[in-house]
Image (cartoon, grey):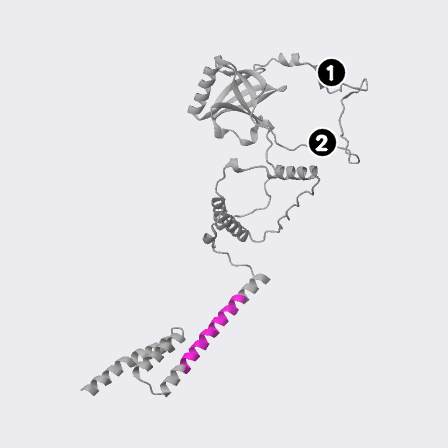
Amino acid sequence: MRSIWNGAISFGLVSIPIKLVNATESHTVSFRQIHTEDGGRIRYRKVCELEDREVTQGEIGKGYEDADGSIIPITDEDLAHLPLPTARTIDIVAFVPADRIDPLQLEHAYYLAASGAPAAKPYTLLREALKRSRRVAIAKFALRGRERLGMLRVVDDVIAMHGLLWPDEIRAPQGVAPDADVTVRDKELDLADALMDTLGEVDLEDLHDEYREALEEVIAAKASGEAPPEAPEPARGGKVLDLMAALENSVRAARESRGEEAEVRHLAPREPEPASAGGRAGKAGTAAGKSASAAKKTTAKKSASASAKKTASKPKSSKTAKKTASASASAAGGGTGTAKKAAAKKPAAKTASRKRTA
């Protein structure tokens, strides 16, 4: 990998020659501006305002615009002689726990490579010291015309450095949080926890840029003269009226996507619905269900009573009477009256049989 900066790490009185290498790369699909009528490229030319002519890159330098509009030229030699100890040095100023660094401060990431064989020993010493202490180093360094703040940590067997924003570059989140006074219930938090547990963890290596892949498919189709793939219909969004229902549905969907359909169930008791049209309809449906159930029980009891009367009018053997009484009791849905009468007749039949024998 090509280095973008050469310097040294200052670790107390120890100096470690290093090279700075970009640790990340962009895979963004870039576009060119074109003339829509004929497809010609639109280019920007660098023109000197005083001479009104296009200039080459070699003729372009740096300059600072003063308050009165005048330009003060600044050369690379001027920048190389800045009165700063960090001009070519990553100056470590402290070692702190990693959780002391606010992720909002993180910027670009770099790898620090040891420059030459003499740098291997001090480089390894600093790397192992960071590993054992489980801390990160805070450093100052100068890059691209400004002094920056950095955080050094160990990645595998390499020291990596993250550029950090200065604390005064982080804006306070004033006016960002919701103004409304919202109360979150424990049941809603329980469902949110259940959803997080169901989604579980993910291997970041499995994640990829689906937008870039879809864009590349469109470009490939147009390049080959084919019709671009059709976009799927967007999910229908709606106003969430019931947060509990939305959370429950989310948990169910997450479990079903993981093949856990058998474990999908009501995760928390639902709160009673307000007396709205939907609530009244639900109550009416419940009442209708109860009435239908009561009607079925009444019909069963009447059938059992009629069956018992027919049995009493026709003389039958004791065995047949017992079977009929048992069937009548079952038809009545477990009716207790008929069962008690049948149970009361059993000892009487046995007593009569004994008297005859005597």
218 to 13, vertically: above or below: below
Q: Above or below — where is 151 with respect to 81? A: below
**What kind of element bears circle 1?**
helix
Does the image show residue 175?
no
Going by the image, does 101 lie left or right of 80?
A: left
Q: Which residue is mark 1?
A: 59
Give the residue number, with chain letter if any, for mark 2: 32
Which secondary structure lies at badge 2?
loop
Up the image or down, 334 lies above or below 4; here it is: below
Q: In the image as oriented, which residue stretches furthest toward the left?
A: 358
Q: What residue is rendered at 49% in x and 69% in y?
A: 290
Name the quadrant containing residue 304: bottom left
Point 55% across, 47% down: residue: 182
Residue under the image location 33 percent in, 81 percent down = 320
Magenta stretch in the rendered image? 285-306
Q: Main secondary structure of the magenta part?
A: helix
Q: Quadrant of residue 72?
A: top right
Amino acid type at circle 1 is Glu
Which quadrant holds the C terminus? bottom left
- Tell which tag, 1 or 2, sits nearer the viewer: 2
Q: Is residue 127 visible?
A: yes
Relative side of 313 to 7, left or right: left
